[in-house]
């Protein structure tokens, strides 16, 4: 998908886009907003505490809707406690309607400033993807202040490997495994898209044999930079790296500086009226994508304040882009 772009003096890419057409029965690009009651009911996707949900310790032979899957059969690496709400990384499955699955899948990373997970973003995005034929996996990743880098990245990489390693058995395409993230979840998604490996062929765990590279990335008002001080979302940086983060760690996780020609294609949306995570975060990232000839689409306009979730303003264009990429 080609986009029209112009250049600012700082070489930042600016794309002027029209809002997507409203959702219709024929084009369900976005679902109706999730109600507070639905958000509350989504708690098992993220906390599972107090809910009658037992995460599957091993990958099931077949996927079932709303199944909760443990990323590791025993304790997760660097697990600090036994609270299933905070210490147990899981994937929750949302399936397309029978006969409507495209075979593609996307791991969804909710935002929350690396201090919590937004049920609204995770559930809403997964429902939108599943309604449009894409199998969705909501990742409940660990976060601060208990956990710091590289735990969060390890959870995201394991999620991609987990889906890819079982894709054929589940009727999915191992070459169409994407990642989607909002806000700090967008930072984690961009981290997974710029810090990946091809797997460890010598690992006894077959999941670790699989590549952690997502086949594409969808970043929605993402945190990106940890070194451009005027535009750093400092709470996300502090929660991910701690109160006394080393400069080298901040530079490593400033993902605008980690893009290479091997970075997967990207769809990026950011509102110029976002006062929480500034649009310059996405500007920097898109400029790096362009500099390395990585395919991308960038929606940069007035899409509301931070944390808008799934809306018709961007979801129609995102779905069209996903379809063009074979999803």
Image (cartoon, rainbow, N blue to C red):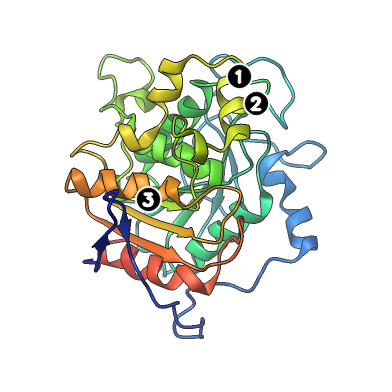
72 versus 25 height, above or below = above
Tag shown at residue 242: 1
For the point 44% across and 41% down, which residue is it? 189
Q: Nearer the viewer, mark 3 or mark 1?
A: 3
267 versus 213 height, above or below = below
> How many residues crowd mark 3 within 10 Å: few (<14), some (14–19), many (20+)?
many
For the point 61% across and 56% down, which residue is it? 307
Q: Earlier in the sequence, mark 1 or mark 2?
A: 2
Q: Position of residue 191 (x, y in %)?
A: 40, 34
Q: Nearer the viewer, mark 3 or mark 2?
A: 3
Badge 3 vs badge 2, beta-carbon distance below 8 Å: no
Q: Nearer the viewer, residue 304 or 53?
A: 304
Disc 3 to disc 1, C-alpha distance:
26 Å
Badge 1 vs badge 2, beta-carbon distance below 8 Å: yes
> How many residues crowd mark 1 within 10 Å: few (<14), some (14–19), many (20+)?
some
Q: Nearer the viewer, mark 1 or mark 2?
A: 1
Tag shown at residue 283: 3
Disc 1 to disc 2, C-alpha distance:
8 Å
SS label for mark 1: loop
Q: Which residue is mark 2?
A: 144
């Amino acid at each position: 998908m080609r986009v029209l772009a112009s250049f600012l003096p700082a070489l930042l890419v600016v794309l002027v886009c029209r809002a997507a057409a409203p959702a219709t029965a024929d084009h369900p690009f976005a679902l109706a907003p999730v109600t507070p009651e639905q958000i509350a009911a989504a708690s098992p996707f993220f906390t599972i505490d107090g809910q009658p949900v037992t995460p599957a310790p091993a990958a099931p032979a077949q996927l079932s809707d709303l199944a909760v899957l443990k990323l590791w059969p025993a304790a997760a690496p660097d697990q600090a406690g036994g609270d299933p709400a905070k210490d147990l990384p899981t994937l929750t499955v949302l399936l397309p309607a029978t006969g409507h699955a495209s075979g593609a899948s996307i791991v969804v990373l909710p935002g929350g400033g690396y201090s919590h997970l937004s049920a609204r973003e995770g559930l809403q995005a997964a429902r939108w993807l599943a309604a449009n034929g894409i199998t969705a996996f909501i990742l409940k990743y660990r976060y601060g202040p208990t956990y710091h880098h590289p735990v969060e990245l390890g959870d995201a990489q394991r999620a991609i490997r987990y889906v890819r390693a079982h894709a054929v058995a589940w009727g999915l395409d191992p070459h169409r495994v994407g990642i989607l993230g909002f806000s700090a979840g967008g930072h984690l998604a961009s981290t997974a898209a710029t810090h990946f490996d091809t797997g460890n062929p010598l690992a006894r765990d077959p999941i670790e044999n699989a590549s952690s590279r997502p086949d594409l990335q969808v970043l929605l008002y993402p945190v990106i930079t940890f070194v451009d001080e005027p535009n750093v979302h400092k709470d996300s940086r502090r929660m991910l790296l701690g109160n006394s983060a080393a400069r080298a760690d901040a530079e490593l996780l400033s993902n605008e500086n980690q893009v290479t020609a091997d970075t997967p294609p990207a769809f990026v949306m950011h509102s110029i009226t976002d006062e929480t995570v500034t649009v310059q975060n996405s500007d920097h990232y898109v400029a790096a994508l362009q500099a390395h000839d990585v395919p991308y689409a960038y929606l940069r306009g007035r899409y509301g304040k931070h944390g808008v979730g799934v809306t018709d303003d961007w979801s129609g264009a995102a779905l069209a882009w996903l379809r063009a990429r074979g999803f």
